[in-house]
Image (cartoon, rainbow, N blue to C red):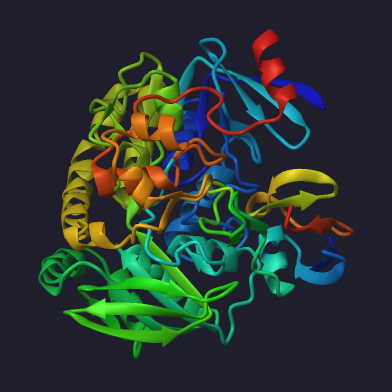
Amino acid sequence: MSNTHHACDVLVVGAGPAGLAAAWRVATSGLRVSVVDDNPAAGGQIWRGEQAKPSSAEAQTWFERIRSVHIQMINGARVFQQPEAGMLPAETSEGVCELKYQCLVLATGARERFLPFSGWTLPNVMGAGGLQALVKTGLPIEGKRVVVAGSGPLLLAVAAYLRGRGAEVLLIAEQASSLQLARFGIGLFSKSSQAFALKQQLKGVPYRSGCWVLAAHGDEKLERVTLVRGGKRWEVACDYLACGFHLVPNLDLAELLGCEVDRGRVKVDEYQQTTVPQIYSAGEATGIGGLELSLVKGEIAGLAAAGKRDEARKLFPILEKHRKFADLLNRTFALRDELKHLPAPETIVCRCEDVTFERLRVHTSWRAAKLQTRCGMGPCQGRVCGGAVEFLFGWRAESVRPPALPVRVESLIRGETE
Amino acid sequence: MSETVLLSVDGVSVEMPAGSMVSAAILKSGICAFRRSVSGEPRGPLCGMGICFECRVVIDGEPHCRSCQTVCKDGMDVRTDE
């Protein structure tokens, strides 16, 4: 194991759209910028694997921008704690990389919200973005029968992508009602031609609103799902269930660094500055808002971190426009209360520690549940069950403790002593 | 760099496009239970992005590797059901 050191003016955590936009703005301001990311390549989830082959003109533009300036990319490195101000150690497969910075931009993105239902722990039941990521990274999906379910615009994008790769998409089950969706439709179509393109790609695939998966069935792996819509239940045989209920911001690193979190997102001012001086945050970590909002937030954060607040201000009107869309998005895909009754008493909620719904519901806080049941104390550190218990019981995580992720003991020791 | 890589999943050879993730190789080999949970349930990948830890396997002798964030390499030895 080897230890490396690295210094820059601005360090960006996360190489998704927000992080790349921030880094580009910093670099064009003439400062030294580095981007650290836990994936093997830049692009985040939405542009995963697209550096060589962008799927949209927008992705291409941004990857070209990134290549046109000097940005130090540190991929495959996971930031897990901050032993002192101005330095973050990141674990790689070779050892620990110590990243020294003057200013920090947290662009840690979002993850899918998973809700427990009977059978959701079976192999081949995955997140919607989860299955897409697997296919993007080499899983053959041709001829496989897939049910896409949950909530949010991601379901459409995933279904279109999978279909384009040869999957037989049997059904898209969206929990939001048709009334909610109609309102969103108006906002969506006035905004983008992408939505129209998606509709074309999904021609012939049933899109059911007010519909969700009640249960997944199978022995050692998924064989079929039970769906419900308007009181009617039916079963569908499938190879994969791609199921995610919109997104939740990744807050752990911000919380670990002492940044205030408000209503489930990193609290920032108009320049994307967090409540901690010299730490900015952008993208989905500061509220779920989609690609366009993430990009402009990233640009503002980058400019502000580079001391160019006047230039950042010029982008405020663009941000406002996209924020309105984001608000509509989040209202449209708000989760219905019926989903709180999805788990049966014996349904596992915490997959790391196999804690059932029945054992959790007697508690009044996540802290109490953790102490009594170990819910949220396994390797994922509540990243999966946290979004679920927040919805099911209204519990919020009370503290994040280092290390933010399971790391090798030698990584911790180095972080402590150097 | 060659277009494909050849690795071993539980002793069976799997050919993957260069740049693929180990998680995809395991599924392609026909295995969908990557590990057993603390109570013995079969589990496979959920999030596909390094968060859920359900896809962890043994890679070249190193336990607890997240297969969804590890790129396939020629000659890699992957063991499931750790």
Q: For this rendering, which residue is in front, A210 or A354?
A: A354
Whether residue A233 is visible, yes or no, is yes
Q: Residue furthest bottom?
A: A204
Q: Residue A260 in the image: state x and y as whole percent.
A: 30, 22
For the point 19% across and 70% down, which residue is it? A189
Q: Give the left or right position of residue B21, taking residue A180 as reference.
A: right
Whether residue A418 is visible, yes or no, is no
Picture quarter with the C terminus of chain A: top right
For the point 51% across and 33% down, which residue is it? A13
Q: Give the left or right position of residue B50, taking residue A385 as reference.
A: right
For the point 27% across and 24% down, which residue is it? A310
Q: Quadrant of residue A269?
A: top left
Q: Residue B17 in the image: state x and y as whole percent.
A: 74, 68
For the point 52% across and 26% down, which residue is it? A11
Q: Is residue A70 above or below residue A339?
A: above
Q: Is residue A55 above or below residue A348?
A: below
Q: Give the left or right position of residue B27, taking residue A71 as reference.
A: right
Q: Quadrant of residue A109?
A: top left
Number of marks drawn: 0
Q: For this rendering, which residue is in front, A2 or A218?
A: A218
Q: Give the left or right position of residue B36, taking residue A110 as reference.
A: right
Picture quarter with the N terminus of chain A: top right
Q: Residue A266 in the image: state x and y as whole percent.
A: 32, 31
Q: Residue A242 in the image: state x and y as whole percent.
A: 45, 69
Q: Quadrant of residue A116?
A: bottom left
